[in-house]
Image (cartoon, rainbow, N blue to C red):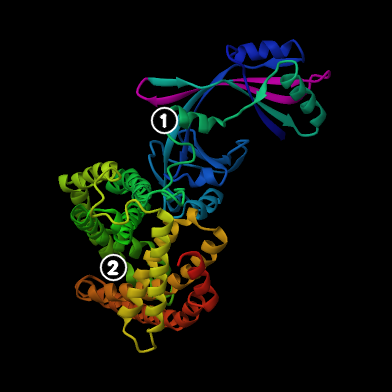
Amino acid sequence: MDGQQTQLQLPDGIDAAGAADRLAAHVAVVTHRAHRADRTFWDTFDGRLHAAGLVLVDNGSRFALVDGATYAEQAAADHARGLRRLAAVDLPAGPLRERLEPLVEMRVLTPVVRVRSRLLPINVLDELGKVVVRLQAEEPTVVAGGDAKIALRPRLNVVGVRGYDTEYERVLARLTGDLDLQPVTELLHDEAVAAIGATPGGTSSKLRVTLLPDTRADAAAVTILRRLLEIIEVNLPGTLAGLDSEYLHDLRVAVRRSRALQRELRGVFAPEPLRVFRDGFRELQVLTGPTRDLDVQLLEFADLAATLPPDAAPDVAPLRELLELRLAAERAKMVRDLESERTRALLDNWRVFLDVLVAAPEEDRPDAARPVADVAGERIATVYGRMVKMGRAIEPDSPHEALHDLRKKGKELRYLLEFFASLYPPEVVKPMVATLKALQDVLGRFQDREVQADALRALGDEIAALDGGAAALMAMGVLVQRLGEEQAQAREQFAERFAQFAAKPQRKLVTKTFG
């Protein structure tokens, strides 16, 4: 059995055969016939496996989930050839699916990079001729499409044999001392991804901006909005292709954040062009809404159906089929809108507008040149104060709209805190975000259950006309009742969560930090 493992970089000009020859001058080795290996590395768009220190390797007919540093196999499963995308739920039940499902969730896995290697096995022997260390010299090449190939740096994989730790250490000392081989500075899959111009670890849709307090407010707004535009555009191809629901989700979050900044920092923009862009981004939010709503309903369908009695769960199959048909229709409409010249012009014009904003006249932009810390602090304090006032006015018999409006205002505050977190002490921002998130969770559950129940009621006539419609309607009635119960529970929790958010120490801290 194998033991310790190390990867070493072969120096420039030394190939696999040269490495074997050099090593043979120091220890007894047996070199075997070289062979080739073709591997494709898979991950999600946002690199969830990479973040977990794992790699999914495909040899053409078999997936292996391996450790990202040592490539030690942890789980595997066969698959059909020619696969171009993979959802964890599509794998057969077994260890690989069990490992992948909680990591990738609703995201699909796709090929990231393909590497073809020439491998030369070299066994190190002791005086009795027993194998004590296994070496493998590797000459990897990225297959970049068509006939294009990119040579990567050759490397030597050193694998110890259990029970021969001393020999392993001795050989490793020879390799790093006498032969001056150094540990690899970049793992093979990361080097291959970088070689094709991609980012090891996937593409993040996180905001991640750092601002300085005395930066002009309009310049700070441009920094944030450019990053949000980048997130919109990097998620657009996956949204159009319908690879998974997270592309559309991340695109919509970036659109919503852009709208929030347009609204909350409107004093850094000239009024008329701002009006045009706010209308355009609102339209972008609207045209992607129905598809996202149906995505969410289908993502949550299994959990919702699980609340039914076991004998009634199959009765909602017609409902799922109807939702899938509606999703297909709404997606087709959304794709046409997103591919339209109108949408392309909106994003292109927005980019140009941001490029020239700081140099634009300031007569009708009163906040443009002010320090961003001053402008942001005022907005955070103001929105927080409005939320406290709105929440205090909510009573047990207040209409649902009062809670919905508070939730919307909470999103504004959450976005402001995200945009400008780098300007304020984390010990202030993090607890504030925590209490806000706890409140938003309750408000979100309250609204989501209402929306879900209304959507089910609206489908009643169509479901009744389908085969099995009567049974489906009865099951849907049970679901609507359960949703109503969960909404009532959320409302009961509101007062406690709001009290924490609006507590006197929190209000004093907001005034001290932002007011």
Q: Work out whether 126 lies above or below 199.
A: above
From the image, state whether disc 1 or disc 2 is nearer to you: 1
The answer to whether residue 470 of the structure is visible from this angle is yes
Q: Nearer the viewer, residue 188 or 433?
A: 433
Check the picture and name the quadrant holding the N terminus: top right
Q: What is the spatial separation of the Cα atoms under label 1 and label 2, in whole angstroms?
A: 46 Å
Q: Work out whether 41 lies above or below 457.
A: above
Check the picture and name the quadrant holding the C terminus: bottom left
The disc labelled 1 sits on which kind of residue?
A: Gly
Q: Nearer the viewer, residue 289 or 33?
A: 289
User: Within 10 Å of the Cα at label 2, are there few (<14), some (14-19), or many (20+) other Cα atoms?
Assistant: many
Indicate the secondary structure of the residue bearing disc 1. Answer: loop
Count of picture labels: 2
- Label annotation for residue 397: none
Q: Which residues are magenta?
A: 120-147
Indicate the secondary structure of the residue bearing disc 2. Answer: helix
In the rendered image, which residue does mark 2 sit on? 318
Q: Does 508 lie within the magenta span?
A: no
Magenta region, main secondary structure: strand
Left or right of 59: which side holds 353?
A: left
Decide which of tag 1 and tag 2 comes sooner along the chain.
Answer: 1
x%, y% of residue 444? 39, 71
In the rendered image, which residue does mark 1 sit on? 197
| Outermost residue to the front | 363
The disc labelled 2 sits on which kind of residue?
A: Pro
